[in-house]
Amino acid sequence: MNPVSLCPVCLISEPSLKELSAHLVERAGQSDPGHIMWLNRNVTSKKLDTDGLSSKFSEIMRYSDLKRWFVDIFVRRFFGEPAHRFIRLMQKPTKELLAGYAIEHHHFLKQWVKSCAYILAKTDSEEVAQYEMENMSTEYFGWNGLPSHHEYLLQMGEAAGISREQILNSKPLGKTEDSIALWRKIARESHWLLILSAMHPLELIANKRIRKYGGTYGYFDPSILSDGSIPEAAARFLYQGYSADQSHSEDALEFISRYSQELDMVEECQEIFLASVDAFDLYLLARIERGDLLKGKL
C-alpha cells in the first residue's frame, strides 16, 4: 500500500506529513474549531506555518519502539500529571459516577462490538480474526461459560441504583454520541488495521501495568475492590476489565506493530490512534457528566 497521512480530526488523506500539516494550518486559519482544538491539545497553541507544524508533527510521530509509542501517548494523555479527571474520580468512585459509567459505557460497548465485527469482516489474517471473535464474545455475549463484560456492566449499574431497563433504554449523551460517530466512520470506511489501531489500544485504560509505564495513577485504586467502598457488583465488573485489558491491549499493539510495518501503514495507524484518543477523552467526560445528572436521583 502507498503510505498516506490521515488528518486526526476529519480523517482526510494527504500524500505526506507536510501536506497534512498544510491542511491543518489551512483549516486552523479558517477558524475551524475542531482542527484548532486538536492542535491546541496535541501539538501547540502557538500559530505555526506549514514547515513549523510539520517539524512538530515529526517529533510527535517519532519512535524507537512503535508499541511503546502508543503506550506513551496514551499514558501522557490520561495518566500524566494531571491525570484525566475521570481517572482521578475513579480512585474513589461515587455511586453516581458508577451509574453514569454504566449508562455511557453501554453505548460504547455497542459500537465496540460493531468495530470488532468490521475488523473481522475485512481482515484476511486468521490470528486477527480469532482475536476479534474472542473480543466480541467476551465483551458482549459471554465466553467460556462466563457472563459478558456487558452483563457485568449492567449488574454494576443496578447495584449503583439504576435499573437495567433504564440503561438499555437510555440515549447516549452528546459527547458519547460524537465519539461513537467517529468510531462508526472509521469502522465503515477504513482498512481493518486502522480500525484495530483506533479501538484496541484504548483498552490500555484498564491495563494494570499502567503505573509501570509512567502513569501517576492506575485506572482505580485497587483497594476499592475489597474495602467495601463500592458495591460488590461494581468491584466484579472492574476486576473483569482489570484482568482482561492488559493482554487484550498488548496483543493488539503487537498486531499493529507487525502488520503496520508489513503493509507500510505505520503513520496512518499512528494518526488514526491520535484521532481516537481525542474521541475517547470526550467519551470519558460523558461518564462524569452522566454521573452529575444522576446526583440526588439514586
Image (cartoon, rainbow, N blue to C red):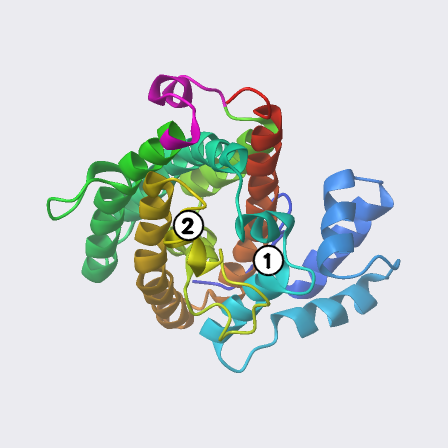
Q: Residue furthest left?
A: 145
Which residue corresponds to the image point at 40% horizontal and 35% vertical from the top-left? 111
**Is residue 116 at all visible to an observer of this figure?**
yes
Q: Residues within 10 Å of mark 2 (few under 14, many from 20)?
A: many
The magenta stretch spans residue 164: yes
Q: Which mark is residue 195?
A: 2
Residue 26, position as x, y percentages in the image: 80, 49
State which quadrant residue 139 falls in: top left
Q: Residue furthest right?
A: 47
Which residue corresponds to the image point at 54% horizontal and 29% vertical from the top-left? 177
Marks 2 and 1 in Cβ contact (< 8 Å): no
- Up-down: is 134 above or below 34? below
- Give the magenta range: 159-171
- Relative placement, left or right, of 186 versus 242 is right
Judging depth in this view, the residue of 12 and 291 nearest the camera is 291
Q: CA distance from mark 2 to mark 1?
A: 21 Å
Q: Residues within 10 Å of mark 1 (few under 14, many from 20)?
A: many
